[in-house]
Amino acid sequence: MKRGVLIIMALFIYEICTAPVPDFRLRMLRLRSATEYAQKRYHELEFDRFIKDLGYRESHNNWLCINSIGCFGEWQFSEKTLHYLGHRQITLKKFRNNPDIFPREMQDEVLRGLIKVNMSYLKRYEHFLGDTIMDVVVTKPGMIAASHLGGAGSLIKFLKSGGKINRTDVLGTSVSDYLNYFSDYNIE
C-alpha cells in the first residue's frame, strides 16, 4: 500500500517537474499541491484499512454477525451505543428479524460517527500519545480501537491508572491488547 502511494507520488512529482512551465513558483505550487493530495489520499487509504481491520477483528467483516452478548454488525455495536448515537430505531430484535434495517453502509457511517464522538471525548487525553504504558506505545489509532472495544471510559481509566485498570471484554480481549494491536496505522 505504502509502496503504491510512493510510486504515484513519484509520478506526480516527475510530471510536475518536467512539464514546461515558464514560472518556477507555479511549478513549486503544483508540486506542493500534488504532494498534499498524495498525503491526503494515503491517510484516507490507511484509515479505510484501519476500519477494515477493526471489522475483521470484531466479526471477520461479517455485517450480519451477532455475538454472545448481543452486539451486532461488522463492528459489533451494542443497542446502547446505537441509541446514544441517535439510532433508536435499530434494536437487536429488529436486526435479527430483518438485518436490512442496519445495512453494511449504515454500519460504516455509524462507526465513523462513533470514532468522531470518541475522539472529541478523548481530546483531553491526547497528551498520553507517545507514552508507553505496560510496554504499549499509546497511538491515536490504538486509542480509537481501544475506546471501541470497551468505551472511551475504559481507555481513560487505563491511561490514568498507568495500566493498572486494564478492562477486558467477555472474550478476554483487553484495552491494552487493542492499543497494541492497532498501534501501527498512520491515520493522522
Image: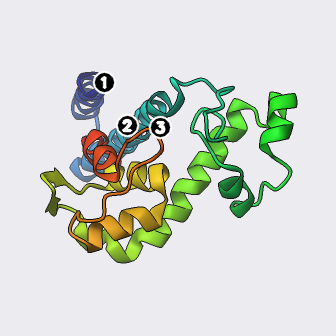
Asked if residue 188 shows in the view, the reply is: no
Q: Say which quarter of the image contains residue 154.
A: bottom left
**Is residue 32 visible in this depiction of the protein?**
yes
Q: Residues within 10 Å of mark 1 (few under 14, many from 20)?
A: few
Q: Nearer the viewer, residue 54 or 47?
A: 54
Q: CA distance from mark 1 to mark 3?
A: 15 Å
Which quadrant holds residue 160? bottom left
Give the residue number, with chain letter if any, for mark 2: 46
| Separation (CA) of disc 1 from disc 2 | 8 Å
Q: Which residue is mark 3?
A: 51
Pointer 3 local density, CA inside 10 Å: few below 14, some 14–19, many at least 20: some
Estimate the spatial distance between the alpha carbons at disc 2 and disc 3, rounded to whole Å.
9 Å
Q: Position of residue 168 (x, y in %)?
A: 39, 50
Decide which of tag 1 and tag 2 comes sooner along the chain.
1
Type of the residue with mark 3: Ile
Residue at the image point whose x is 82% and y is 56% from the top: 88
Task: Determine whether 181 is above or below 97 in the image.
Answer: below
* Residue named by callout 1: 1
Q: Secondary structure at mark 1?
A: loop
Point out the image quarter for the N terminus.
top left
